[in-house]
Amino acid sequence: MFYDTTSTYFEGEEADELLAHYGYSKDHRGDRKQVVIGLLMTKTGIPIGHQVFPGNMHDTKTFGMVVEDLKKRYPIQKVILVGDRGMVSEANLDQIRELGMEYIVGVKLRKSKKAQELLSIRGPYKKVLPNLKVKSKKIDGETYVLCYNPDAEERDRASRQVVLENLQSKLDELGPSGLVKNRAYSKFLTIEKASAKIDEEKVSNDEKFDGKYAIRTNSSLTDEEAALAYKELWRVEQAFRNLKSNLELRPMYHRVESRIRGHIMVCFLALVMESFLAYKLKEIGCQTSVKDILHDVSQVKASKIRVNGEEQIVRTELQGQANLAFEALVTQAPPRVLEKNTCH
């Protein structure tokens, strides 16, 4: 199962103080009170649960709470929880292990000494996908996997080159004090008293991380399986984008806790239905996006007409690829003509 969090903010009058708080806004609206929402999804992309947390709650704390709730709600034999690197603390991992669950979580490669041991592993990578190769090492009972993306390596190298090309001119213009707070620049500088220069050793050290990220797991999955599972976290990110745009999760104008939770529940149920349709469309080999399919379905209208004194309801023709929605769900579109007394 995949887990991630997002936030959504309030407009209008002050909302319920139990939920609405200032916190780290993933909508970049730190000027608004918000709530945090945790979302659980299956590996096939179907949402199975959500939780609403106070807006000032940190991701790592929500992660632990969801783990406990998951174990209580679902009588399943084996759970592998997949979480992003920003959401996991050692206390949470201990909690997951105590509950007899497995995990695959991201690691901050630049900050983890254990993960950086992966950089010294000799030998070739194992190819998983054209843009994904892996190496691994057992460390303290866990498997640490180094993931390498050749395309991302090129992007990282090009990005760093642009920074370095601009850095010297910025130094001449602003001096070291003007760049210290700029992380993109400062990480390549050595500052001595009132002067600064580009540190070639820091540049070389930065190159070691190009196109690489790390994960850790206590599961019995192979390196390739763990890397692919972690890569699938994009499904949760896509779900949040759908919630906030297509399904109008944000902003919220409710104030009472029950209505706040109700608004989020309605959006969640809409996401479940949309995700299920996307899954069924994929099953029949449909290449069109679920967003485009739903747009075509939304064009279907119904009109009341009177024929020989009888009132009937007539629907318009199916537009575009709207028929694929009914095909995927193994059902039929409503008939063209419905008598009034048959409509409910």
Image (tube, rainbow, N blue to C red):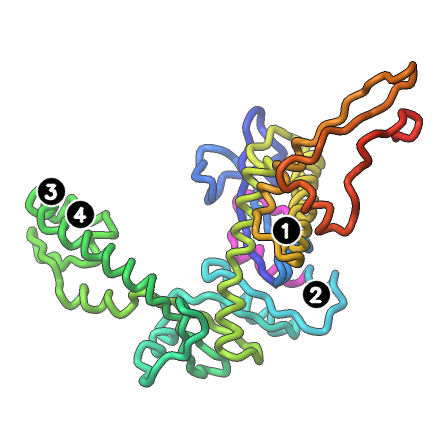
Quarter of the image for residue 44 reads bottom right
The kind of residue on which mark 2 rests is Lys
Query: How would you rate the neighbour count of disc 4 (Cα within 10 Å): few for under 14, some for 14-19, many for 20 or more?
Result: some
Task: Name the residue at 77% across, 40% down.
Answer: 333
Image coordinates of residue 194 in percent, x first then y, are 7, 51
Residue 298 placement, left or right of 157: right
Closer to us: 330 or 246: 330
The kind of residue on which mark 1 rests is Ala
State which mark lies toward you, 1 or 4. 1
The magenta region covers 50-68
Residue 343 placement, left or right of 247: right
Query: How would you rate the neighbour count of disc 1 (Cα within 10 Å): few for under 14, some for 14-19, many for 20 or more?
Result: many
Q: Choose the circle earlier in sequence order: 3 or 1.
A: 3
Q: Find residue 204 and name its label.
A: none
The kind of residue on which mark 3 rests is Leu
Q: What's the distance in space between the residues labelled 3 and 1, CA to CA?
A: 52 Å
Q: Find residue 174 and name its label.
A: 3
Closer to us: 122 or 293: 293
Residue ID for mark 4:
179
Disc 4 element: loop
Q: Are marks 4 and 3 in contact (CB under 8 Å)?
A: yes
Residue ID for mark 2:
71
Q: Choose the circle earlier in sequence order: 1 or 2.
A: 2
**Quadrant placement of the C terminus:** top right
